Amino acid sequence: MIDLRELRDNPDTVRASQRARGADESVVDALLSADADRRAAVAAADDLRAEQKAFGRTVGKAAKQDRPALLDRGKELSIEVKAAEAAETAANERLTAAHKAIPNVIIDGVPAGGEADFVTLKHVGEPRSFDFAPLDHLEIGERLRAIDMERGAKVSGARFYFLRGVGARLQWAMFNLAIGKALANGFVPIIPPVLVKPESMEGTGFLGEHVAEVYHLEEDDLFLVGTSEVPMAAYHGGEILDLADGPIRYAGQSSCFRREAGSYGKDTRGIIRVHQFDKVEMFVYCRPEDAEAEHLRLLSYEEDMLGAMEIPYRVIDVAAGDLGTSAARKYDCEAWVPTQHAYRELTSTSNCTTFQARRLGVRYRDEAGKPQVAATLNGTLVTTRWIVSILENHQQADGSVVVPQALRPFLGLDVLEPA
């Protein structure tokens, strides 16, 4: 949730953020109104409780003949206090609902607009020129006996797959490289649960506009996560962290699940848009003033991994209307996919400022020892989708695939040969 003090002091900043996102500005005034109503309701209830407490002392000191009338007034006060407390509860509920309706306030400089309005920050590497007709990743994967979509559909349905043989080994090689790089940069590795409670999912902002993409186990009231960001964000929920020595960094490896609601007909071939995939996700808790520098650090780790894959990519500053609820800024790294003649997202890193931590109750102590809301950030270090770009960019005319140098020690192969 956004900072209510920021809203009260700078409502126009929040309105501008909503405009940049292409979102409803009226929710800002609705929250201001709900905040004012809640403060008035709390004050009214506090005044009545104070009056009731003082009145109780008066009754004890009153003369016997005066007590019946005073007791009647005491009953009236009790009714008034209960009504005021009910009004206070209702006002709190309205405030919470209005508060949750507003996404994070974007950081200055984030491009306005929707999905197509991103700003390209840089290109790294040149798309390869082929002297043969390149195959797409699925055909390559099938020839290598690395990807089996047909049996994935037979066993689980559309948009499921098996990685087998060198396909499974390729993913393990990428993940081992990623964890090694994470350890070298001070991240604590985590294998988190992939089923979480509703409050964990809501706390990270995934039960709003993204709820249709989430798998929900109704009988248990648990959600399958679409990213290990969720359990890692909730990991320190309700705690006060020690950030005296700098940010706390985690690298979570997990399977991820997404319903891909509304995406039917898009990327149905291969493993670009699927219901289940694996990922190593970076997650950081830090002081708010350190968040922007930490965001650039996460981006550098992503670029280091992409550079090790020896594939062309670009970095984009995602437009406000394409940001998730919790993100104040997001950078995507998109790799070149030769058969699509396009760059496709492989990593994202988001600065969520204090938005998630405020929902989840994650704080730290400042220099004066006073608890303050922490900032959180996340970023993809590697994911299954990377296989798409590796296979297509490193394919050879005979159907083989040259393994990037950095993966060879983990894979034990220099070239993947067709079966």
Image: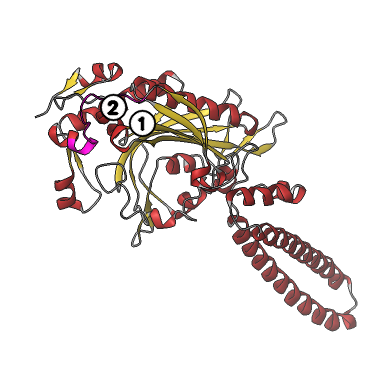
Mark 2 residue type: Asn
Residue 62 makes an appearance in the image: yes
Judging by the rendered image, the residue that carries numbered circle 2 is 393
Please tell me whether residue 326 is drawn above or below residue 347 in the rendered image. below
| Secondary structure of residue under mark 2 | helix
For the stretch drawn in magenta, the main secondary structure is: loop
Q: What residue type is labelled 1?
A: Trp
Assign a secondary structure to mark 1: strand
Q: How is the image coloured?
A: secondary structure
Q: Which of marks 2 and 1 is nearer the N terminus?
A: 1
Decide: is 244 above or below 227.
above
Q: How far apart are marks 2 and 1 (CA)?
A: 8 Å
Q: Does the magenta stretch include residue 138?
A: yes
* Residue 293, quarter of picture: top right
**Total residue callouts:** 2
Q: Measured from the top left, where is residue 55 in percent x and y?
A: 84, 70
Residue indicated by mark 1: 336
In the picture, measured across the screen, residue 149 lies left or right of residue 13, that is: left
Q: Nearer the viewer, residue 278 or 80?
A: 278
Q: Please provide percent x and percent y for residue 321.
A: 54, 48
What stretch of residues is rendered in magenta?
127-139
* Along the viewing direction, whichever of 289 and 319 lies nearer the viewer: 319
Please tell me in which quadrant of the rendered image residue 220 appears: bottom left
